[in-house]
Image (cartoon, helix red, strand yellow):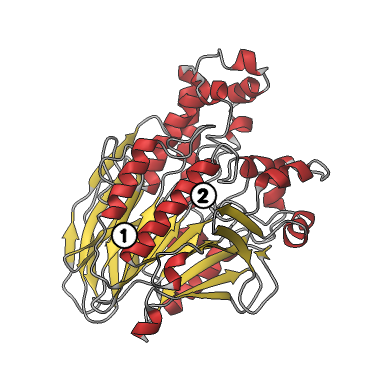
């Protein structure tokens, strides 16, 4: 499997990248050679991340780390490792990167898979668009793999899942279970990411990934305390966590990501991307599964670490965008109302787990509100234009949170935009559910005094939800605006929304 590119940050004029490759043990680790177009070729040595002798054949995961000196123009960087040749593009020095965003790369059920005639069509669309546009980053917001089938393909887990809860929670996570779960997750990544369509993209755009529930199994973190804490669930989570760190973050056991949030015990990470002009960008990826339980999404100590990182962001009065990966949308219809109505629809169970663990759950509403208040405070005090990026819900959507409270000198500081893109592989909900979302569900919600959230139609349309597979392009222009373009299956023209930075009128 591989190579898979990872983004390791931008520092001192360098675009830092890693490449991950899984080989059998008959293949010796080799150097990776890379060269910008017309530049000098450089070779770097491999780091062994994990030996997997128990697999058949025995496997090893390797990582190569390298940095490209940015120049005044965008540059094509070719690389070769173990006879595999590929390339990626580094942005010009002083310019903000073009990025793609995707989520939900898989199927939650055989029924969902069978509904798609061309399962990898949108990966092919992203590859074709990248060949013309050149995306410098690929942000992946959760469900990079779907692990739900482990309850069917592992006989011991299938038997365990059929037990009454009071008996199941007393069962041990046996050595045989652990061995089979380890084999399952390893094979899941290799099989899914080894398919030619996603493999072509993953080898050509450096990635920033954050997990969601299906990377563990459906609904992780929203089960009852006795199930969440039982030995079998915790054993599965430990293995899923290890393979998430290995394959999605490209880390050896016990290693810390170079972009990790200081003092955080979660996988949260962030980076700043500088431009030479009046504009800049920061990206924050929240880990919303590592701490999650029925009472919290993120533990208080890890929220503090995130807020400390945000408070330490550069404050030089430039126009800045802050992109936050929140795997589940902060702005979305109140799921509790949907859950009540789902009882009248056939096949409702497929969506209930996703809806039950939303930010609007009664157990998480206060945590959500505190988060919104902190983002408004940051935006208004530091002049950051906050945009949330989410997936999970298998539709595309635009939402906004607005504040009418005093204190903001610019209207843009009183608006948080939510961009949802889902899924690049998983199909949309049934048509009856889309009709219900579009025609029945309320679009507005009062969150607090003078603070409200709203689902808004896509500009130039009356459509609030994209009920077809999609991926999102995020393309900054020279004026500091961020153009969000949803590329939708079998639709020629993308859905578009432009996000203006704070102070845009003054800059214009």
Image quadrant in which you'd find residue 299: top left
Task: Report crowding for label 1: few under 14, some 14 to 19, many 20 or more residues within 10 A (C-alpha).
Answer: few
Judge from the rendering whether residue 457 lies leftward or rightward of residue 441; answer left or right. left
Image point (31%, 64%), residue name: 382
Residue 53 at x, y percent in the picture: 35, 31
Q: Which residue is mark 1?
A: 83
Above or below, comparing residue 294 to residue 261 in the picture: above
Image point (33%, 48%), residue name: 307
Judge from the rendering whether residue 377 lies leftward or rightward of residue 419; answer left or right. left
Above or below, comparing residue 450 to residue 187 in the picture: below
Q: Residue 208: tell me if it is visible.
A: no
Q: Residue 47: tell me if it is visible.
A: yes
Under circle 2, the secondary element is helix
The label number, if any, that marks residue 192 in the structure image: 2
Which of the two marks, 1 or 2, is nearer to us in this view? 2
Q: CA distance from mark 1 to mark 2?
A: 22 Å
Residue 487 at x, y percent in the picture: 57, 71
Image point (69%, 70%), residue name: 463
Circle 1/circle 2 CB separation < 8 Å: no
Residue 161 at x, y percent in the picture: 64, 24
Q: Earlier in the sequence, mark 1 or mark 2?
A: 1
Above or below, comparing residue 38 to residue 233 in the picture: below
Image point (53%, 53%), residue name: 330
């Amino acid at each position: 499997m591989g190579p898979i590119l990872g983004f390791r940050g931008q520092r001192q004029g360098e675009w830092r990248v890693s490449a991950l490759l899984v080989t059998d043990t008959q293949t010796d680790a080799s150097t990776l050679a890379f060269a910008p177009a017309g530049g000098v070729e450089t070779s770097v040595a491999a780091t062994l991340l994990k030996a997997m002798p128990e697999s058949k054949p025995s496997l090893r995961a390797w990582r190569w780390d390298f940095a490209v000196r940015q120049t005044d123009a965008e540059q094509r960087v070719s690389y070769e490792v173990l006879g595999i040749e590929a390339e990626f593009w580094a942005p010009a020095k002083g310019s903000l990167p073009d990025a793609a965003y995707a989520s939900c790369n898989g199927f939650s059920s055989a029924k969902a898979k069978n509904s798609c005639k061309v399962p990898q069509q949108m990966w092919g669309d992203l590859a074709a668009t990248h060949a013309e546009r050149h995306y410098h980053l690929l942000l992946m917001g959760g469900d990079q793999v779907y692990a739900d089938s482990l309850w069917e393909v592992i006989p011991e887990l299938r038997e365990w899942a059929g037990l009454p809860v009071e008996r199941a929670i007393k069962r041990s996570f046996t050595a045989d279970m652990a061995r089979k779960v380890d084999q399952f997750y390893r094979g899941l990544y290799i099989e899914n990411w080894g398919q030619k369509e996603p493999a072509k993209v993953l080898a050509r755009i450096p990635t920033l990934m954050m997990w969601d529930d299906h990377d563990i199994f459906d609904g992780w973190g929203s089960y009852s305390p006795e199930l969440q804490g039982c030995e079998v669930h915790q054993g599965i989570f430990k293995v899923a966590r290890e393979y998430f760190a290995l394959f999605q973050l490209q880390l050896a056991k016990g290693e810390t990501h170079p972009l990790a949030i200081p003092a955080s015990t979660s996988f949260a990470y962030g980076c700043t991307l500088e431009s030479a002009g009046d504009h800049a960008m920061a990206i924050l990826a929240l880990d919303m599964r590592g701490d999650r339980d029925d009472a919290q999404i993120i533990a208080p100590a890890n929220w503090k670490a995130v807020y400390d990182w945000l408070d330490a962001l550069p404050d030089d009065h430039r126009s800045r965008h802050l992109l936050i990966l929140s795997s589940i949308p902060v702005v979305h219809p109140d799921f509790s109302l949907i859950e009540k109505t789902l009882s009248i629809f056939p096949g409702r169970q497929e969506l209930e787990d996703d809806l039950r663990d939303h930010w609007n759950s009664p157990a998480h509403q206060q945590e959500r509100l505190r988060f919104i208040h902190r983002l408004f405070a940051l935006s208004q005090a530091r002049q950051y234009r906050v945009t949330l990026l989410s997936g999970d819900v298998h539709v595309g959507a635009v939402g906004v949170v607005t504040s009418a409270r005093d204190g903001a000198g610019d209207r843009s500081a009183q608006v948080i935009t939510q961009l949802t893109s889902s899924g690049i592989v998983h199909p949309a909900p049934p048509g009856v559910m889309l009709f219900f979302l579009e025609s029945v569900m309320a679009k507005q919600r009062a969150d607090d005094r003078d603070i409200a959230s709203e689902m808004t139609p896509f500009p130039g349309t009356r459509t609030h939800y994209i009920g077809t597979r999609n991926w999102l392009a995020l393309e900054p222009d020279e004026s500091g605006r961020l153009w969000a373009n949803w590329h939708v299956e079998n639709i020629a023209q993308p859905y578009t929304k432009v996000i203006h930075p704070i102070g845009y009128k003054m800059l214009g």
